[in-house]
Image (tube, grey):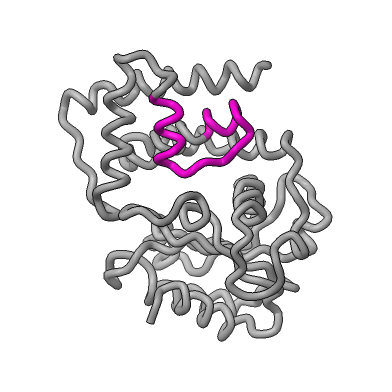
Amino acid sequence: MDQIQEIVGLVGQVLGSEVVGTYLHGSSVLGGLKPASDVDVLVVSRRCMNDQERRDLLEGLFRISGSPNQARPVELAVVVQSEVRPWRFPPSCDFLYGEWLRHEFEASGPPQPEPMPDLALLITMVLAGDQPLTGPPPARVLDPVPHTDLVRATVAGIPGLLQDLDDDTRNVLLTFARIWTTLATGQIRSKDAAADWALARLPPEHRPVLQHAKELYLNRRYSEESWSDELRAQVRPHADRVLAEIDRLRQR
């Protein structure tokens, strides 16, 4: 069965008529899935999930997401409609699964509701992509995110990304490029398109690292990542340069 159909089926099985709509975002709506792309899905629900539903949804995602299942990683967020319509910042996410969180959930149990600034980006991508898997068009379900809140959400994750720079270098560098692009243009682009935009604006000495991250994203599967010692030494100087550009835009 197609992985997206499996996700939709799982959500329907667990939440049933409480689902307002299920929507694609991320790479699926920003130029298409690449070899290292997650399948990104936003579920809008009428109410908070109970403990049993959280366990059932998590167990289902364990079975259909990521390399243990020879499948793409799934990132699935469930948001209660009343938490984001009318819009307010920061929004709260009722349930968030990502493959990078698998070991944490295996040890401590299902995710719980918590504030999630990144929902501003997810909702913006859902509205722009306009690709419902179930339910009405997203514009009938979600309010648009003000640009000021999109900026706030875009930069909120930078400290956490810096902590992951050594362990998840490719994705962190591509995300920094996307943040820079979003602040400069107001548009959320695919990771490779954001890298192209940033490469055209970086001095030559800071391009090789981002070029390599882009090539890994376009040509390698999810967890395959290799860096030479020479490139690895350039990672932090490159990140510092991009973060300086981001900070400059924030001060405008």
193 in magenta: yes
In this rendering, the answer to whether 118 lies above or below 23 is above
Q: Is residue 152 left or right of residue 191?
A: right
Q: Residue at 41% of width from left, 33% of height from top?
A: 195
Query: Who's the residue at 53% across and 30% down the image?
Result: 181
Q: Position of residue 8 (x, y in %)?
A: 53, 77
Q: Name the main secondary structure of what is drawn in magenta.
A: helix
Image coordinates of residue 173 in percent, x first then y, are 39, 34
Quadrant position of residue 132: bottom right
Please identify the quadrant where the C terminus is shown.
top right
In the image, 57 versus 20, the foreground residue is 20
Percent of width and height locating residue 59: 44, 77
Q: Nearer the viewer, residue 67 or 5?
A: 5
| Residue shown at the point (41%, 57%) measured from the top left | 38
Residue range of the region highlighted in magenta in the rendering: 179-199
Q: Position of residue 147 (x, y in %)?
A: 72, 36
Q: Is residue 219 magenta?
A: no
